[in-house]
Image (cartoon, helix red, strand yellow):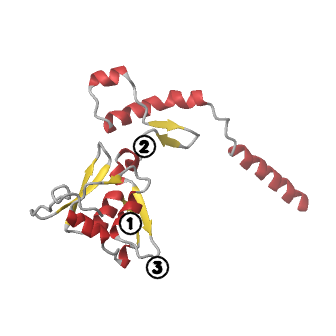
Amino acid sequence: MRGHRVCFMSSLLLVLSGCAYQPPYDPADSQSSVPEASEATASKLSPQSSSDQDEVPTIDVLRTGRYQLVTTQGTIGQRQLLEQAVRLNISPFDQATVGQAVRRVLLNTGFNLCQNQTIGVRQLLGNALPEIHHNIGPMTLRQALTMLIGDAWVLDADQQRRVVCFKPRNLIEDVTTSELGGVSE
């Protein structure tokens, strides 16, 4: 009886290991099968004129393994910097200001804070950071900045210079520091 059991188990292992065989990865095979799927995907995802499609074919998806496809486009946060995910963790024992929190959120995002801030914004940035804002995220950069500055202010981001400024939400304009003779922070 014991001999039958050993024979059965060894034949079962042999059959199962034969099903798990994967041929070695060949990049030539994966590139030849991808363009058909990616051309259909490219026509749905990227609005291009017919003359652009004739000149340069785009590949949106690459096959990197037997069951793995990888997109060739960056994430939304990589393409639109205000949509990147950020997180803020400040110790509750730190006497952090709103300005320090905004600068820490902007750290490594590609954006800087405006140099020419209005007096109202300077006052806001000098205020103590509410305890509820010591730990925020993960959320988008736009949401984090909007949360930190509050509802009375509007986020104004210059995408070309990658500078973030804040403007009052109401119609009353603050006096800029240049009009007051350059009051410093």
| Pointer 1 local density, CA inside 10 Å: few below 14, some 14–19, many at least 20 | some
| Kind of residue at disc 3 | Phe
Quarter of the figure that contains the C terminus: bottom left
Q: Can you give x and y, in whole percent of width and height, for residue 97 in the image? A: 36, 71
At 25% from the left and 55% from the top, the residue drawn is: 116
| Kind of residue at disc 2 | Gly
Choose the circle earlier in sequence order: 2 or 1: 2
Give residue 74's mark: 2
Q: Can you give x and y, in whole percent of width and height, for residue 96 in the image? A: 40, 72
- State which quadrant residue 114 falls in: bottom left
Left or right for 64, reference 8: left
Label 2: which secondary element: loop
Label 1: which secondary element: helix
Q: Distance between the residues labelled 2 and 1?
A: 30 Å
The residue closer to the viewer here, 175 or 21, is: 175
Pointer 3 residue: 93
At 43% from the left and 30% from the top, the residue drawn is: 36
| Pointer 2 local density, CA inside 10 Å: few below 14, some 14–19, many at least 20 | few
Choose the circle earlier in sequence order: 3 or 2: 2
Q: Can you give x and y, in whole percent of width and height, for residue 137 in the image? A: 40, 66
Q: Can you give x and y, in whole percent of width and height, for residue 4 in the image? A: 86, 57
Relative to 72, say whether 174 is above or below. Answer: below
The residue closer to the viewer here, 122 or 182, is: 182
| Kind of residue at disc 1 | Gln
Choose the circle earlier in sequence order: 3 or 1: 3
Give residue 116's mark: none
| Pointer 3 local density, CA inside 10 Å: few below 14, some 14–19, many at least 20 | few
Relative to 144, say whether 57 is above or below. Answer: above
Furthest-front residue in this view? 181
The residue closer to the viewer here, 67 or 42, is: 42
